[in-house]
Amino acid sequence: MMRFILPLVLFLILAVFLFKGLGRDTREVPSPLIGKAAPVFSLPTLNEPAKQFSPKEMLGRVWLLNVWASWCEACKDEHPVLMQFSSEKVLPIVGVDYKDKREDGIDTLKKAGDPYDQVISDADGKVGFDYGVYGVPETYVIDKTGIIRFKQIGPVTPENLRDKLMPLIAELQAK
């Protein structure tokens, strides 16, 4: 009887950890970049490949970095929310066209509208890797000093825009 108790206890402990892990929301994956400087890069803009963009250009402003792709269905769901939000001119939104063909990204924005103040092309995904992108869409709130303050995994919805992003943005802009 005693020889079954230890395996049973170990099984129960393992089951508790497994149950807790399966119950987590995959959109709540903690990012090791929160509270750290946003990775520095220089990438070509989508519409003008000879022109480069770097996050250094955004120092002194709170801004969003939105990683998307033309092939991403969830990005299409998020797009109207970003269009509405960008029309309010709350802060600059920089789009990163991730692992995409330039012409597909350009075509998508022509058809659906362009909510971005700047769109850059990360065709090989290196910048996405540096930012810890799990999949698109992902959105980062970056403060005036270039520190990542929030990461949204998955599409921005009206609810998380209202409940999470806007209060944080207002707080950061007031500083």
Image (spheres, rainbow, N blue to C red):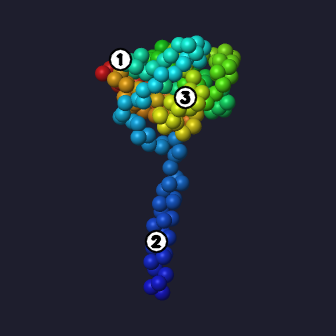
Instruction: Name the residue tied to disc 2.
Output: 10
Query: Which sits in the foreground, 111 or 126?
Result: 126
Q: Which residue is mark 3?
A: 67
Q: CA distance from mark 2 to mark 1?
A: 53 Å
Q: Residue 10 at what x, y percent from top left?
A: 46, 71
Expressed as whole percent of the image width and height from the top left, the position of residue 110 reads 67, 15
User: Dot 3, crowdedness within 10 Å: few (<14), some or many (≥20)?
Assistant: many
Q: Are marks 3 and 1 in contact (CB under 8 Å)?
A: no
Callout 2: helix, strand or loop?
A: helix
Give the distance between the C-alpha atoms of the residues marked 3 and 2, in whole angstroms: 42 Å
Of the image marks 3 and 2, the number of the one nearer the N terminus: 2
Residue type at the position of mark 1: Gly
- Residue 169 x/y as whole percent: 40, 24
Is residue 77 depicted above or below 9 in this figure?
above
Q: Is residue 165 visible?
A: no
Q: Where residue 156 sits: x, y (%)?
A: 54, 30
